[in-house]
Amino acid sequence: MISPRPGLSPSVSVSVMSHPDRAEAARRLADSLPELSPAVIPDPDPQGPPSALRAAGAAWAAAPEGAGHHLVLQDDARPAAGFAATLERVLRAHPEAAVSLFVEWGSRTAVLARWAVYTGAGAATVVNPYVPTVALALPAEHARALGRFLATADEDEADDRAVLRFVRRSGLTPLVAVPNPVEHDDRPSLVGNSDHGIRRSACFTPSPAADLSPAVLEPPRFLPFLRWNIGTPVLIDLDHDVPEAHRPLAEVLDAWGLSKDDRSEALRKGVEAGTLSEVVPEPHLTALWHTVVAEGVVLRSRWPEVVDSLRSRADGPTVRAALASLAPGALRCLVDVEALARHEAEVVDLVLAGLEYGAAHGRIPKGWT
């Protein structure tokens, strides 16, 4: 249904994707958003094998004439309080973009979402090889076109990768709103993603953000990234993003003036007072440390004052959520995430220490590639 919001022009329509196995969850989600009057769109082939692509095609095709934007929520989305008002503000700020309202905490885009939180931006560019689709809004004419596009896609293609192909073909800019106003209520996957581990938000806050900046974080060239599936820390060159070009972070940090001995000693000091090393054993602890140290170097090179102010802002809910999400997001398939959650204060302290150490002692040499 079209939901006209006061002051929001144009209006927004909302679909909730639904499979019969999750019909009750879809209805609860729709009922939780009365201001938006979501329509629950059932899987057009409920007897067939579960397919996010098929269900998404129906949900996008349901965008009615007269709507300005169309939002599709998967049935395991969990919107924050005040979601309708937040959605209005986000779409006002980015009316021509494809806006994801959730990004999972271990993805490449999650790195940029956290940096957007640190720098005060209200959105980050999507750099994943897919568009996050747990909660995605498009201009309505593009939504209907996406419905038609997905209807012709290969049935074995992942829906989020098909959406990326469509977005690129259509000239839309894919963004993720920061902080994420949607969390992922991580139930067992219907489409074979159960081995991906727990997929939660990089920067969800359950209450509405006080301010939403219209600024979009412009990605720097270099992106330190801890691969969530294998635990390997690498540097991604976003100007040449192919797996063969990913560099081990240990070698990169050597080149940036941070020796192995110095890094190890800084890590030892960072964990000696706590028990985090019991929850995050080696080699994962060093991999996490190298990642946050490299992030500190990159942040210092692009936004010189940001890291210096983070510790004083770490008790703010959005900043704390971002600081706390890196370790469980990157290590979710390798350590006990629930045990890690019980050590959140130590996780945040270690991430802050790594960012500060990298910013203070590392430098990207001029002309380094």
Image (spheres, grey):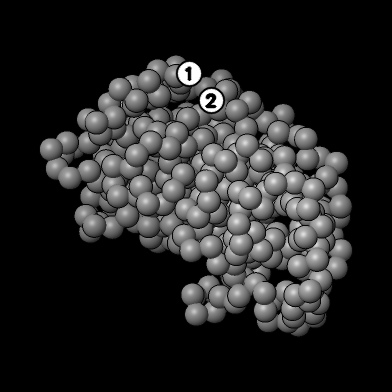
Q: Residue at x 17, y 36 (%)?
A: 46
251 relative to 57 in the view: left or right: right
Q: CA distance from mark 2 to mark 1?
A: 7 Å
Q: Which element type, helix, strand or loop, lies under badge 2?
A: helix
Residue corresponding to mark 1: 35
Residue 41 visible to the viewer: no
Q: Which picture quadrant has residue 331?
A: bottom right
Instruction: Tell me the crowding category of disc 1: few under 14, some 14 to 19, or many 20 or more residues within 10 angstroms, Cα based.
Output: some
Residue 367 is situated, as x and y percent measured from the top left of the image, at 76, 82
Residue 207 lies, with reference to residue 160, above or below; the image says: above
User: What residue lies at 56% left-to-right and 34% top-to-bottom?
Assistant: 181
Residue 41, horizontal then vertical, whole percent? 28, 31
Q: Split into 4 quadrants, where in the image is the C terminus?
A: bottom right
In the displayed structure, does residue 270 sit left or right of residue 198?
Answer: right
User: Where 262 sits versus 186, above or below?
Assistant: below
Q: Residues within 10 Å of mark 2 (few under 14, many from 20)?
A: some
Nearest the camera: 221 or 25?
25
Displayed quadrant of residue 122: top right
Relative depth, front residue between 316 and 16: 316
Q: Which residue is mark 2?
A: 84
